[in-house]
Amino acid sequence: MPSDLQLKIMNTVHRTLLTVTGGRIGNSIFGMPSLQLTTIGRKTGDPRKVMLTTPVIDGDTIVVVASRGGDPTHPAWFLNLRDNPNVEVSLREGPERPMTAHVATAEERATLWPRVTAAYKGYADYQTKTTREIPLVLLTPRS
């Protein structure tokens, strides 16, 4: 699995590619739309930005996967939004929108997981690499 430093470098490269190419490169990865998720650091209280993909978009609801490539630990962004579900989301370099995050319930996950793995089979592989259940997070517009 990539180290935290490698993940930060990959995020920086992704954002730079989006900026330099005017969004022609990086708006879609493995056929999934990309987004920038801004959480509030649970330890620092500072905004934290991460580039992710979304395998499922249902109307105003965006689903992201806390896979970290099948690593045994949750990604930091997931821990941040679990502690503070108020996030900002920019989908495909669009405007940042205030959203609320919630971890999918068992019922929601049972319905969504087949759709997630159909969109990107790698998620099923990631799940086989770890004993933790990979969380799905639903992002919905904040009122």
Image (cartoon, helix red, strand yellow):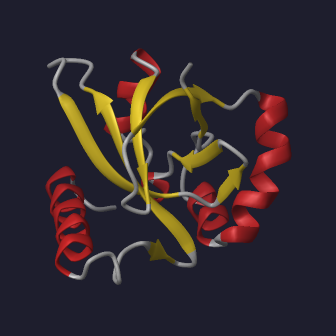
Between 78 and 49, the one nearer to me in the picture? 49
Q: Position of residue 100 (x, y in %)?
A: 52, 25
Residue 65 relative to residue 14: left or right = right
Q: Position of residue 69 (x, y in %)?
A: 45, 60
Name the residue rendered at 56%, 57% in the picture. 54
Image quadrant in which you'd find residue 42: top left
Residue 86 relative to residue 121: left or right = left
Q: Position of residue 14 (x, y in %)?
A: 26, 69
Residue 52 relative to residue 103: left or right = left
Total residue callouts: 0
Name the residue rendered at 81%, 58% in the picture. 114
Residue 4 relative to residue 80: left or right = left
Q: Position of residue 51 (x, y in %)?
A: 34, 56
Image quadrant in which you'd find residue 124: bottom right
Q: Quadrant for the C terminus, please.
A: top right
Name the residue rendered at 55%, 58% in the picture. 129
Q: Quadrant for the N terminus, please.
A: bottom left
Up the image or down, 57 lies above or below 125; here it is: above
Name the residue rendered at 78%, 30% in the picture. 106
Between 42 and 22, the one nearer to me in the picture? 22
